[in-house]
Image (cartoon, rainbow, N blue to C red):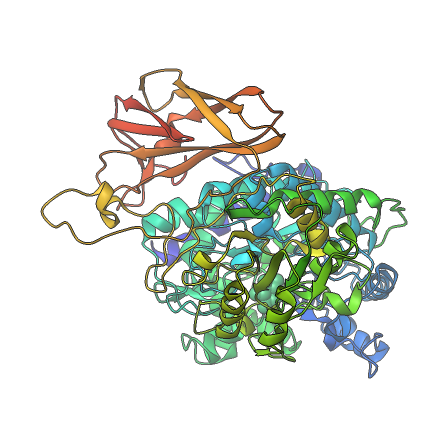
Amino acid sequence: MNFTKIVMSTLCVSAAVGACAPKAQQVIPCDKAVEAKVEKVLSGMTLQEKAGQLVQLNISTLEDATREAIDPAKLDKIIGQYKVGSILNVMHDAAHSREQTAAMVRQIQEKSMEAIGIPCIYGLDMIHGASYLTDGSLYPQEINLGATFNPEYAALMGRAMAYETRAAQVPWVFSPVMDLGRDPRWPRIWESFGEDPYLQARMAAEETRALQGEDPNHIDLQHVAVSIKHFMGYGVPLSGKDRTPAYIAENDLREKYFAPFLACFRAGALTAMVNSASINGVPTHANATLLTGWVKEQLGWDGMLVTDWADIDNLWNRDHVAADKKEAVAMGINAGIDMIMDPYDPECCNVIVDLVNEGTISEARLNDAVRRVLRLKVRLGLFDKPVWDEVYPDFASEKYARESYATALESEVLLKNEGVLPLKENSRILVCGPNANSLRTLNGGWSYTWQGSADDYVPQYNTILEALQKRYPGQVTWVPGVVYDGSDWQKDVVASFQQVKNEAKKADVIVCCVGENSYCETPGNMDDLNLSANQKQLVREAASTGKPVVLVLNEGRPRLIGDIEPLCAAVVDVMLPSNFGGDALAALLSGDENFSGKLPFTYSKHINALHTYDYKVTEHRETMEGSYNYDAVMDVQWPFGHGLSYTKFDYKNLQVSAAEVKAGDVLTVSVDVTNTGDRAGKEAVLLYSSDLVASLIPDVKRLRGFEKVALEPGETKTVTFRLPASDLAFVGGDGRWRLEKGDFRLSCGGLGTLVRCTETKVWETPNI
Ligand code: BGC
């Protein structure tokens, strides 16, 4: 795509926005009153003020020597002189109470209104609830939400997160995260909903609506603006390491990686944060085709694009696509960036001023970017109420605690059970492993601090050990065996295997809690996806006693356990279930509650065979015939969607409303699900399609629908899916969506049926 053409035509589109000119397509409806206010403010601004609106600084630039309060002289400089329009993050790099946070924001707003007459916009990384408030509520991480296969939990978390963030006078969160977790080596897969584009899109859009409310033009005092992130393709670096290059075919980018972003733009997402790294050699912050072309032009999106942390600097000092900062700033803004998160450098404002004076950034592009920032502030009501006196009675309420617990219950996944679970009432339980007595590991990163430090902030919640001790008073013994060592999250050391073996003699069952310590972003990089050698040895030593081992995995990504899994009588993956995750696990292990989580990712078995469920038919010998029958096997530990229950579900009568479809038709697919066991349970019913012949090698299957149903013993429910035929389309090599004539197999719960598409349709527009 021609770069100049994109930028020019976007500017024409944007110039018309002030008046809400009729346009072909606009994902967020234009609101005349909002636009009028934007134009009025814009018309009175100086160049310095405009430049300041495009810059976001870290709160550390305002901190005094204590790092707990704002230095008034710095406030004068940053807001008064540089006229910076946005601040992010937390003082002293740590969580503060709602009151402390609100007081800090009030002080900044007062200055901003006095010095510029434009409110500042404060943004925080609220990732799984109020991550940065000491007294707020946390929910399980998004990867757990994915495992519930129940979008209602994304909505509950979104609503609570919005409410508690607003209660702290903050109107903007850098959430939800929708990088597809398609490479288990990458240290951020737990921040999003799993590996599948459809699951990710449903959950992220639900969370977006819950965070922002129903009307993106008028966000009320119970809601906040989202920053969907990280646009896009961030989650599959070739090296597996954070912020390193990805190489993604354009059709995959459009069909899979764009899907959750598209769903969120359509749900009204007001801002998006850009992928820190690069795709096919182009740093995303300089990618005009994606930023301006795909989002602003093709969708007519009038929201705001913010960079990730220092990523304009990365264009020159890391990526070497610009010679210096000045060139990098011009490159980013001309590619479509509207706000630069330049954490420590207010001089960025002057660089923008110079670039506009020189003409390297046009007045039109400058004004377009400023409009987008102002529009966000108007939509949030910040001009009318830079701060607000609303009361928030539900802040940190029991209601949110109950929701967090319920989410944890539905998200922990029973992967294997040879009959040892539920635990018997009179069991003597030996608990071991480095994750047994830690809130930090239950929460993961973005929990009170960036790297996660829940134990320091909320010791009142129960670890797995404490929850089991409460559920089985006097029956639990605790010997760690292996412990995490200090600040290096990857380092664990052997405490004593012998003690574990001694205590095992007196126990009926061993609950061995292993996994990872908390981490976030680049510090979470590692060189071996295998569970650590010490922890594997702990499992071997425990199993050598002959007592049944219940393996509990508490980890942000599927660490490989192929060699020790056969030694365990049961395996549960709790992932990162947060503050009530220990209580939820005790209720599930004891059988007080039933498991219903399913894996939102493929749990791989071998280091050289990391898969996703939607692999190409040519990758597996069962789906491949032909002259080269390679030894291709999909030998995974557990597939995407795997998850056991204490009851059994039987699927019958998979029906489809028509045997033949055309592109515009909508199919109805139904299936009867019966609980054939003797206890109540919930089942996530997953509908897949397979394109049997296509002009590009088809994926073996794709998730097209899911629904979670609750069933009493003996009860049957008919689950019905609405399936537009266009959902069966894929993106061809030319970047266009295509639905092709031919047969599709629909499958659900082991049943299958064929549907024939009787026409081929290619969509000219980028998205259908
Ligand atoms: C992360 C983002 C985050 C930003 C602001 C970056 O390092 O990649 O996810 O929103 O910092 O804290």
Which quadrant would the C terminus be assigned to in this image?
top left
Observer able to see residue 122:
no
Q: In front: 212, or 484?
A: 484
Q: Nearer the viewer, residue 453 or 215?
A: 453
Relative vertical location of residue 293 with respect to residue 528 in this rendering, above or below: above
Provide residue 281's location: percent of width, then percent of height.
35, 67
Residue 185 in the image: x percent, y percent?
45, 64
Residue 259: x and y, percent? 46, 44
Considering every residue shown, the one lying at the far bottom of the view is 65
- Can residue 517 be seen from the camera position used here? yes
Q: Residue furthest top?
A: 658
Q: Residue at the front extreme?
A: 505
Q: Residue at x 74, y 55 (%)?
A: 467
Q: Residue at x 33, y 59 (%)?
A: 609
Q: Is residue 104 left or right of residue 219?
A: right
Number of marks in the rendered image? 0
The quarter of the picture where residue 488 lies is: bottom right
What residue do we see at 63% from left, 54% from top? 141
Q: Residue at the spot x=73%, y=77% of the render?
A: 61
Query: For ligand 1, which image quadrant applies?
Result: bottom right
User: Is 335 drawn above or below residue 746 in the view shown?
Assistant: below
Residue 203 in the image: above or below residue 752: below
Position of residue 440 in the picture relative to residue 17 (left or right): right
**In x, y percent, where is residue 511?**
61, 58
In the displayed structure, would residue 43 be above or below residue 238? Answer: above
Which one is nearer the viewer's eye here, 323 or 39?
323
Give the left or right position of residue 157, taking residue 310 as reference. right
